[in-house]
Image (spheres, grey):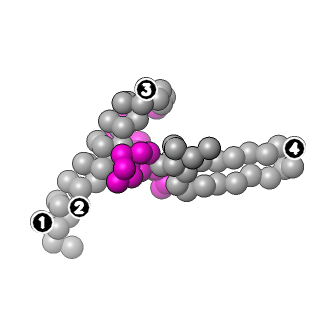
Amino acid sequence: MDRKRREQLEEKEERETTEILSAIRERGVEVEVQGDPVEKIRAMHERPRVQPDHSLSWPVFFLYPEFSTSDFVQEFNENNT
């Protein structure tokens, strides 16, 4: 991959990460991370996403201990119940 293309991808990722962090802060969600939050979000395989309507979709892990099972939803919109 050429240098210019790589720089464009890095800039896009930086904008997306900043947008995610801003959306989380706007909602007053307290997220505790050790180290740089930007780097933590970049390293996440599944991470929050800002949708076109400006809502957030989160990766969510549901644990049902009474049934010894769990579910993982990659994108769970904050407006869903």
Q: Position of residue 11 (x, y in %)?
A: 20, 54
Q: Mark 3 sits on what residue?
A: 28
Residue drawn 52% across the image and 54% down it:
75
Report the disc number at residue 4.
Answer: 1
Reading the chain from its start, which is encountered first: label 2 or label 3? 2
Instruction: Say above or below: 78 vs 7.
Output: above
Q: Quadrant of residue 34?
A: top left
The alpha-carbon separation of the residues under discs 2 and 4 comes to 44 Å
Residue drawn 25% across the image and 48% down it:
15
Which quadrant of the rendered structure holds the C terminus?
top right
Residue 50 is left or right of residue 70, and the answer is: left
Q: Mark 2 sits on what residue?
A: 9
Residue drawn 82% across the image and 43% down it:
65
Q: Specify the amino acid type for callout 2.
A: Leu
Instruction: Say above or below: 13 vs 65.
Output: below
**Observer-nearest residue: 27 or 20?**
27
> From where the camera sits, is residue 42 visible?
no
Outermost left residue? 4
